[in-house]
Each structure stands twice: as C-alpha cells, then as structure tokens.
Amino acid sequence: MTPLYGHTEAVSAFRKGLATGRLHHAWLLTGPEGIGKALFAEKAVLRLLAEKAGPPVDAPGLDVPDSHPIARLVEAGSHPDLMRLERLPKDNAGELARSITVDQVRGLQRLFGTTASFSPWRAVIVDSIDDLERPAANALLKNLEEPPANSIFFLVSHAPERLLPTIRSRCRQMRFSPLEKDAMTSALRTVLPDADDIEIDALAAVGEGSPGRAVAFRGLDIDALDTAMIALATEGDPVNARRVALAASLSLKSAQPRYEAFLSRAPSFIARVAKERRGPALAQALGLWERAADLAGSAQRLSLDPQSVVFELAGMLATLAPKPDHG
C-alpha cells in the first residue's frame, strides 16, 4: 500500500485508541482534498483488521506488511468485513455518479447482518461523506446513532460544515492539514517516480500541501492559468475580454481537467491576495473569497455551466484589481 506521509498526530491518536481498546466508533476525517485522508482511513482500517485477526503486527505507524494475510485480502478488495461507499461509475466512459445513493448505504446491512469472518470487527470507509444524497445521509445516521458492536466508520470529508450536524455530533473529528514541504516532496517522489527534481518542485508548489492536487495538475500548464489570474487581479478586465477568453478556453470538453484545476485555484488565489490586505480592502477580498469558494465548491456538484462559472469567477478576480486613478 502507498506510504502515508505526514499526519503524525492523527496516526498517534489512532494507535493510542487501538492500544487502549478505546476506539471511537466513527471518525470524521476533515481537511483539504488530496492530502491523504482517504489513505489514512485505508491504512487505519487495515491495521485494525490485521491486529484483531492476527498474526500480530510489528510495524511502525499504521503499516502492515504486504505479506500479512489480511493485507492480501484488503488489497484484493475481497475482505468480507470491510465495505467502502463511494460514487460509482455511471457509464462505460468512467464518469462517476453525482452522489452516493441511499441504496448503497442500505447495502451496509449485508455487512452488519452477518457474523464477522476473521475477527469481531467490521469497518466502513465512506469517501467522501460529502457525496451522500440526503436520504443516504439520513440512512447512515441511523448506523452512527446505534452502531453495531465492534464496528468502526471512517468518514472522509472535504467540507464538514455542509454535513448534517447530527452526523458531526456522532463522530470524533480528526483534522488533517496540508503537508509540509519535505513530506510533500516525499509523497510526490513515491507516486511519480519518473518525475525529475524540477518537476517535483514545481508540482509541490502548485499542490499547496496536497499531493493529490499536485498529481491532478500534472501536465495541465498551471503556469498559464496562474498568469491569467494574475492579469485579471492586477490589471482588471474593463471590456471583459480576459473573462470571455478564459471562459471559452475552459468550457471545452477537452479542457475539463484544466477547468477543475481553475475551480481549485481561483479561491486559493483570492485567499492569498486577502492576506496582503487590510481594512476595507481585506473585507472586500474575504467577501470575494467566500463567494468564489461557494461557487467553485458547488459548480460540479450541481452541474453548473462551466463557461458561466469561469466567467463569474474571473469577474471576481478582476474585482481585486486596483481602481484606475482619474485624479
């Protein structure tokens, strides 16, 4: 399994619960997307299932040797005491469904309606709980309110503020932060062994502590996107020419990965600008950041028109530009 870099406090907290037998039944893993929350869940579940089933695991952190029989079952996706809930492919092209359905959540009864196979423990990973449709969230809540004995849930969330308060209240929240530079570089070298030092450094910079984001940005000419955003934020767009051009270029079907990169980077760009401002200018930038984050976060979930989304976000960036001095 891929190594987990960073997140030493989270690893220590879980290992302590495992050693003392005081594991909370539901763990809400929160933080930016792509920083390792789902990988932590996978490794924590494997460590739990392996230790409870035996033979004993003598490895640091959450590691389990590949030769362990439970590790082989989990790697093959055939461990009967583990279920994953995630968006399913909806066509042969690999496009994913918009949400995790209530029928998928109800399918957990197959896990909890039978006796555990290798140890008393059963585990569920939801990646991500943000993707649950409302009926599915209500169905999952029933499991969290009355958890079966020796069950554990890992709920990955990139936007916990959008979850039902009743779900959050049933969980132990574990916050994950973006990786530091050394951990980020190590993670990228592991997943991109063919990349040279220059590319690794460039990806680490644009990834902003998220290896997943950095890998997704590879080959997308992120420098050109950043240049376009800088031009909007410094020079403005009085006749909308920059907004129109950017929206047209990112609305093509072939540009979907760059569109997604723009959705990720535009709010972060505004946040960086806000840090450099004070007084009314800071308040303006923070207001723009809130609007941009909300729009970018809902654009794909609600299947909003990409051209309109880019045009509006680009307009927010242009609003950051200094006003012309007519005096």
Image: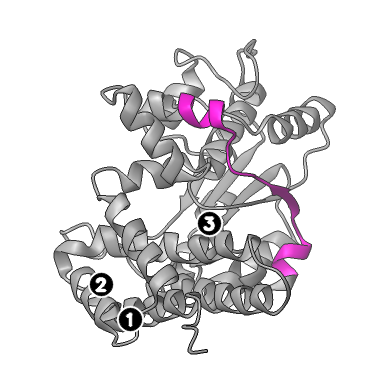
* Front one among 240 and 307: 240
User: Are the residues tagged 2 and 1 within 8 Å (C-beta)?
Assistant: yes
Percent position (x, y) of residue 18? 75, 29
Q: Give the label, 2 or 3, closer to the camera.
A: 2
Q: Is residue 107 visible?
A: yes
Q: Which residue is mark 2?
A: 246
Sequence order check, earlier mark of 3 and 1: 3
Q: Is residue 54 above or below residue 316?
A: above
Percent position (x, y) of residue 320? 50, 75
Residue flagged by tag 1: what amino acid is it? Phe
Q: Is residue 114 visible?
A: no
- From mark 2 to mark 1, how far is it between C-alphas? 7 Å
Sequence order check, earlier mark of 2 and 1: 2
Q: Which residue is mark 3?
A: 108
Q: Secondary structure at mark 2?
A: helix
Residue flagged by tag 3: what amino acid is it? Leu
Q: Which residue is mark 1?
A: 311
